Amino acid sequence: MSDAVLVIGYGPVGAATGAQLAARGQQVRVMQRKRPPDLPQNIAFVSGDATNRASLRTAAEGASQIVLAIGLTYSGKLWRDLWPRIVGNVVETAAATGARVVFVDNLYMYGPQDEPLKETMALSDYPLKPAARSAATRIWQAASAAGRVRFAALRGPDFYGPGVKLSVLGDTGLGALAQGKPALWLGDADTPHDIAYVPDFARAVVSLLDAPDDAFGQAWHVPCAPTRLPREILALGAAALDVPLKVRSLPIWAIRAMGLVNPLMGEFAEMRFAWDRPYRVDCTKFAARFWSNPTPFEIGIPKAARSFRGQMAA
C-alpha cells in the first residue's frame, strides 16, 4: 500500500485538505461523480459514488488513508437514508483495504445543548438531521470498537473561508456585504456563535492523518478562533471591504413561519437550536494533543471577504 490519500468530496474542506497534502508532495486523488473544473494538476481524479460500495472500493485501491469530506443536499429525509449508507460503505471499504479514515463531520449529533459542545456528549436521535448523523456515528464507532477499522471523526461547526459560498458567512453574509447589501444572519446576530476557518479545518485533518493509530477510534473537535458575536465577525468583513456594516437578523419565529411554505427554511427551522442560543464548541481535547492556534478572525475574515470582492471583479 502506498502513502496515497483518497479524498472523497471536493467541497471547501476536501479541496483545502487536498491542497495541503499535495503541497508537501503527497499523492492525492479526489473521488466524486464529476471531475472538479478547478482540480490542480498535481491531484489525481477518479470518478465514483460513495453510495455505491463497489465504486468506492475501486477508488480506494492502493490508498493508505481516506478523507470522507462530502456534503449532501440539506434535507433531513435525504440524510436519514444516505449518511448511514455512505459511512457504512466507507467502513467496509476501510475494513477490506486496511486504510485509515478521517471523517470531516459536523456537530449535529449532539442535538440541542446549552453548554459548550464536547466529544463526550450523548448522541441525539431527534430531529431528522441529528438522528441521521447519530446513526452514521454508531456505525463507525461499532466497527472501530470491534477492531475492524481505524476511524476518526473530526467535528466542526459552520465554517467560512476564501471562496466558500455555501456558509452562514458565504454568499448571504460576506458575499452580500461585498455587494453593498445587508448580511443575513439566522437568529440573533448578537448571540455568540463559533465558526471554523476552512484552512484550519484542513490543517486539523492533516494532523489526524499524520497521527499514530491511538488518535483513531474517537472524535475530535476542530479548533476555532475565540467565540465572537456574529455582528462583530461581520464587522471585520465590512471594514476589510470598506463598506458600512449592515446586518439583517432573521428571527427564529420567522424561520419557522417561512418553513411552512419554503422547504429549505423548513430544514433550517428543524435546526433552530443551533441559532436560538449561544453556540460554543469545546476544542480543548484537540488542542491538548495537537495544536491550539487557530486563525484569528482578524486574519481569516478579511481574506474571505476580499475573495467575494475578487469574484465580483472576475
Image (cartoon, helix red, strand yellow):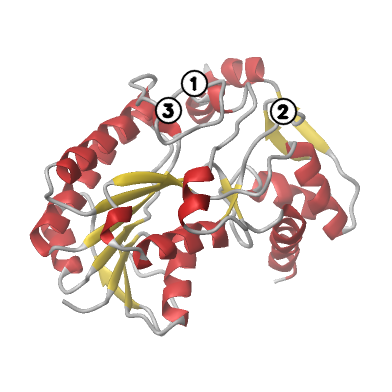
Q: Residues within 10 Å of mark 2 (few under 14, many from 20)?
A: some
Helix, strand, or loop for circle 1?
A: loop
Tell which of 156 and 282 is nearer to you.
282
Residue 288 image position (x, y, % from top left): 50, 51
Query: Where is mark 1, residue-wise?
Result: 112
Residue 103 at least partly seen: yes
Helix, strand, or loop for circle 2?
A: loop
Q: What residue is drawn where x is 51% and y is 22%?
A: 113
Q: What residue is drawn where x is 26% and y is 31%?
A: 135
Q: Earlier in the sequence, mark 2 or mark 1?
A: 1
Residue 180 image position (x, y, % from top left): 84, 50
Q: What residue is drawn where x is 71% and y is 56%?
A: 296
Q: Quadrant of the N terminus?
A: bottom left
Q: Quadrant of the C terminus?
A: bottom right
Q: Residues within 10 Å of mark 1 (few under 14, many from 20)?
A: some
Check disc 2 and give the amino acid type: Thr
Q: Earlier in the sequence, mark 3 or mark 2?
A: 3
Q: Quadrant of residue 146?
A: top left
Query: Where is mark 3, residue-wise?
Result: 110
Q: Residue furthest front?
A: 288
Helix, strand, or loop for circle 3?
A: helix
- Horizontal side of 213 relative to 9 (left or right) equals left
Query: Where is mark 2, residue-wise?
Result: 191
Check disc 3 and give the amino acid type: Tyr
Q: Quadrant of residue 9?
A: bottom left
Q: What residue is drawn where x is 42% and y is 79%?
A: 22
